[in-house]
Amino acid sequence: MSKLIINSYDELASHLGERLGESEWLEVDQERINLFADATLDHQWIHVDTARAKEESPYKSTIAHGYLTLSLLPYMWEQIIEVNNIKMLVNYGMDKMRFGRPVITGSRVRLVTTLHSIENLRGVCKAGIKFQIEIEGERKPALEGIATFLYYFI
């Protein structure tokens, strides 16, 4: 699917209720997990100790941190949409966010999005984006929720 190009509030609003797109698949490997553990100081064995995870984990492998999965959202979002004619974009919040399945090391994930809501707040576009981070080959998503962005169109 090609990247959606948006140039105004009205263009974005015209997609209300529609699937905006999906990102490319991205592998979540052990190196990425280890780097995230170092950045967040979260070195729980289920994420970083491959030998112990192989023996003791119900997944027989390490798994990605839930917040690592969440942190991939901006990277994958940029693959789906390009919003032009803005002076600023603000991450406003998350609603109804749920971690559904662990991302086992070596799995591939992608972002799928729908425009859930949109409001014009005195010239600021408040957009609610329903998202799912899917795991290749799994029916249940790793993560889902509604991300709210504020777009300050020029």
Image (spheres, grey):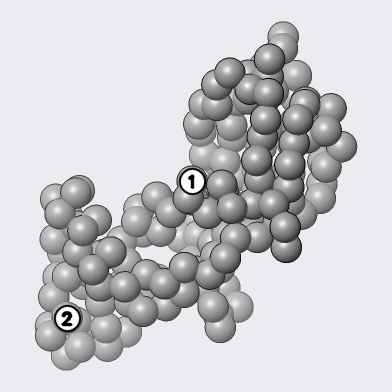
Which quadrant would the N terminus be assigned to in this image?
Answer: bottom right
Name the amino acid, label 2.
Thr
Residue 31 location (% of width, % of height): 23, 68
Q: Of helix, strand and loop, which one carries label 1?
A: helix
Query: Who comes first in sequence, dot 2 or dot 1?
Result: 2
Q: Mark 1 points at which residue?
A: 74
Camera-nearest residue between 10 and 51: 10
Write the residue at 55% across / 26% down.
89
Residue 68 against residue 96 in the figure, above or below: below
Disc 2 crowd rating (10 Å Cα; few below 14, some 14-19, many 20+) is some
Q: Mark 2 points at which residue?
A: 50
Which-is-in-front pick, marks 2 and 1? Answer: 1
In the displayed image of the protein, which residue is found farthest to the right?
14
Camera-nearest residue between 18 and 97: 18
Residue 5 location (% of width, % of height): 73, 42
Name the amino acid, label 1.
Pro
> How far apart in space, not on screen, are marks 2 and 1 (Cα)?
28 Å
